[in-house]
Image (tube, rainbow, N blue to C red):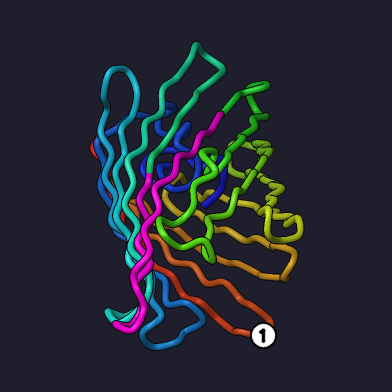
């Protein structure tokens, strides 16, 4: 997920992307974190055009029933003129602990912006937890505030480059870079790298009529591989 995502999955990455291409869509994703049994992350999402913009909703679950997290969110994005789109989201997060420990709940707000600087160059800005929210009744737990800024460049009709800076207030600055190559408008090949810690990512997407199937894998030099797959249905 990046600040420059468009359509359905931008609800989780930068809600401003919902306003660029508001369409009726639904999708599911699953990632097996570091290929560890019981440490999977599943996401369901849907989007629809509303009042000249896009409305998105998503649900996610990470970890087994005994412990882990559940997240649900509502996002809205709307275009402002030809070059700008703005969006915001509200999400609730539940941390599940074993019975000996109480669960923790937090509600936070995010905001995002997309802007087309030229026909080939665009930027994205996303602030996660702009409300500076924490977990109710748990002073030992808090939500991070994350600021991300991305830059995208359409080199040719089929090749796109992206770069992003991400600063979590608890962690060092992360630098991300990636590229996507589209083949015949149906097949997309993707590759990326992230710093601090180093991660390599590779993926592919296949589009057939209204369906899009995506697969990806990320590699952490210590924790290993995390495979991911997703299916998206979009109504034109």
**Pointer 1 residue:** 222
Q: Would residue 181 be found to the left or right of residue 18 on screen? A: right
Residue 12, how many percent across, how many down?
43, 48
The quadrant of the image that shows the C terminus is top left
Q: Would residue 102 be found to the left or right of residue 13 on screen? A: left
- Residue farthest top in this picture: 81
Q: Which residues are magenta?
A: 91-113
Q: Is residue 186 among what the camera can see?
A: yes
Residue 21, how many percent across, how many down?
39, 29
Q: Would residue 209 be found to the left or right of residue 225 on screen? A: left
Q: Is residue 29 among what the camera can see?
A: no
Front-lying residue, 219 or 175? 175
As helix, strand or loop, the secondary structure at mark 1 comes to loop
The residue depicted at 64 percent of the width and 44 percent of the height is: 148
Q: Would residue 102 be found to the left or right of residue 188 on screen? A: left
Front-lying residue, 95 or 15? 95
In this rendering, the answer to whether 206 lies above or below 16 is below
Q: What secondary structure is the stretch in magenta mostly built from?
A: strand
The residue depicted at 33 percent of the width and 63 percent of the height is: 70
In this rendering, the answer to whether 69 lies above or below 66 is above
Q: Is residue 106 magenta?
A: yes
């Amino acid at each position: 997920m990046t600040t420059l995502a468009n359509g359905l999955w931008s609800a989780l990455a930068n809600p401003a992307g919902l306003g660029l291409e508001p369409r009726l869509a639904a999708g599911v994703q699953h990632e097996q974190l570091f290929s560890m049994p019981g440490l999977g992350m599943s996401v369901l999402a849907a989007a629809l055009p509303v009042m000249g913009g896009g409305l998105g909703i998503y649900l996610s679950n990470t970890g087994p029933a005994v412990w882990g997290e559940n997240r649900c969110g509502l996002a809205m994005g709307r275009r402002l003129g030809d070059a700008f789109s703005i969006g915001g989201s509200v999400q609730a997060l539940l941390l599940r602990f074993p019975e000996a420990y109480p669960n923790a709940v937090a509600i936070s707000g995010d905001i995002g912006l997309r802007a087309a600087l030229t026909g080939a160059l665009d930027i994205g800005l996303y602030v996660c937890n702009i409300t500076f929210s924490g977990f109710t009744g748990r002073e030992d737990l808090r939500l991070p505030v994350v600021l991300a800024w991305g830059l995208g460049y359409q080199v040719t009709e089929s090749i796109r480059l992206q770069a992003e800076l991400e600063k979590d207030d608890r962690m060092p600055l992360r630098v991300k870079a990636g590229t996507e190559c589209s083949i015949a408008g149906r097949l997309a090949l993707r590759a990326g790298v992230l710093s601090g810690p180093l991660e390599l990512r590779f993926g592919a997407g296949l589009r057939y009529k209204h369906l899009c199937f995506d697969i990806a894998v990320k590699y952490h030099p210590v924790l290993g591989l995390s495979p991911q797959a997703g299916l998206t249905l979009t109504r034109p």
